[in-house]
Image (cartoon, rainbow, N blue to C red):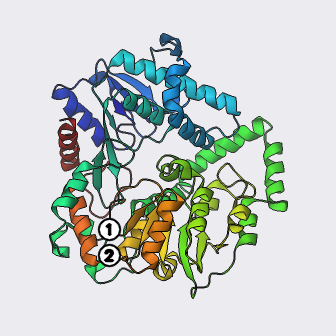
Amino acid sequence: MLMEWANSLPELVDVASKLKENGHQILYWVRNDSHFKVDESAFFGTIFHSHIEAREGKPAIGLKLTDFEPLGSDIIFNFFNAESVFMSNVERYYPKKGAQEKKQLFYDLLRYWYGLTVKLKPDVAIFEEIPHHLHSHVAYSVLKFFNIKIIILNSIGLNNRLLITSDIKFNSQKLRLRMKENSDKDFNLGDLSPEIKINIDNGTNYTKLPVQTIALYNEQKIKNKNNNNVLVAKLIFWLKIFISFRIFRITYNFVKNRIGGNAKKEYLKAQKLPDFNLKYIYVPLHYQPEASTNILGGMFVNQINLIEILSASLPEGWNIYVKEHPIQFYVNGIGYNSYRFKGFYNRISNIKGVKIIPMDTDTFKLIEECKAVATVTGTAAWESVLRLKPALIFGDNWFQDCPGIFKVNNVEKCKAALNFIKNGSFKTTKQDIIRFLFSVEEATIFGNFSFIKSEDTVDSATNVDNIYKSIIESMK
């Protein structure tokens, strides 16, 4: 099964062709076909499923939900965690649906993917990305339940490096083995490839912003809001609004947000200037909704949970500075929503030791002056350890095994980490970071599957060959 495969990069169709040519039967293929079309006739016998229709709970052409038996409580019981993730994630797409309607969509998706897996009996499922869509995470949970071999290609934010894992927890045995083998070795910058080395800024200081996929992605989000295709889409959208007479409700909500309360006003009212002379932990909030919290964060998709655990773990005299993501209001608007609900910032500002600070506060000064960074899975934690500053992460990310990272999920672990830092026991060197990056280079492949391109773009033929070989190796 190919899940979310070749969404934006045609080269992945070539990977699929190589798999087919070498005796691997592609039973099922889910993809977003809005970027480009695939010649489905070249894959005879493959069931193609539209990403959008899969997300909406619509079966692939030729299949019906009623082809599969409804599931009883004895089976559904095994997917309570998947349901919890789904109920958080579904807000992104269907905020107006009621709770029971959302749960029904989950049960329909579970019934479909459970029945489909029993019917097709796949040997391997390959995901182009972390399974964070409504349907793909349910499918992933079902496949894990049946112990189907899973291969996930993770773009880790280092230029064109892909980390292959078998689950969404980034449990890479290959990376940990390389780290163990390299634990007593010393490396220098010259041992790293250019696309890895760029993250260290000549190895002499840690003041330069590393090239990060998330930064490019956010930039792309902003550009997308201004390109011609989006303008045309907006024109069509507003034309439909006028025709359906929804313009009156939208105008009312717009005026209400401007005159009455909204999320941005609540944030601005709660914010205070930071005092860099104080001891503090820097907490940069995630942009939401995104897979970085909705899937990889688990219960910490609600970031209040993280801040409350930090507060209960703070050493005496320490503070917490919380800063909103700079594009949160730009992308989602200033109104309240499921992720920035009414009272969200007030709740945070009333937590003991917490201060909400202005969004335009320089994030790198905050990192330089803090005692530690704390985040669910955010890039700021990686930027922190590159600068030899400790970081706490509450979710799962590719750099979670890097020296300087403390992986925590409760008060006990958080207290232990902060006391370790406070007592001066924490020490990370530039060599530690270089050694980790060398291990990452050995454990990853040079490849790309995204519309995001960086300075060291891998050529098409190499990209296809590297991804194909990594899949074959992972199947063993």
- Residue 322: percent from the left, percent from the top? 60, 70
Q: How many marks?
A: 2
Q: Quadrant of residue 405?
A: bottom left
In this rendering, the answer to whether 432 lies above or below 375 is below
Quarter of image, res 11: top left
- Of label 1 and label 2, which has the lower sequence position? 1
Q: Is residue 60 visible?
A: no
The answer to whether residue 451 is left or right of residue 413 is left
Q: Is residue 456 above or below residue 123?
A: below
Mark 1 to mark 2 CA distance (whole Å): 6 Å
Residue underneath mark 2: 428
Q: Which residue is mark 1?
A: 403
Q: Nearer the viewer, residue 128 or 116?
A: 116
Q: Which mark is residue 308?
A: none
* Residue at (77% x, 40% y) in the render: 242
Q: Residue 183 at x, y = what percent? A: 19, 66
User: Around disc 2, counting alpha carbons within 10 Å, would you say few (fewer than 14), some (14 to 19), or many (20 or more)?
Assistant: some
Report helix, strand or loop for mark 2.
loop
Q: Is residue 221 left or right of residue 131?
A: right
Position of residue 30 relative to residue 398, above or below, is: above
| Element under disc 1 | loop
Instruction: Please report contact status of discs 1 and 2: CB closer than 8 Å, yes or no.
Output: yes
Q: Position of residue 163 (x, y in %)?
A: 29, 51
Q: Residue placed at 50% from the left, 79% from the top?
A: 370
Residue type (three-letter) at the residue carrying disc 2: Thr
Q: Quadrant of the C terminus?
A: top left
Q: Would residue 27 be visible to someone looking at this image?
A: yes
For the residue pair 235 and 335, the one nearer the viewer reads as 335
**In the rendering, at what x and y percent does residue 8 appear?**
39, 43
Q: Amino acid at mark 1?
A: Pro
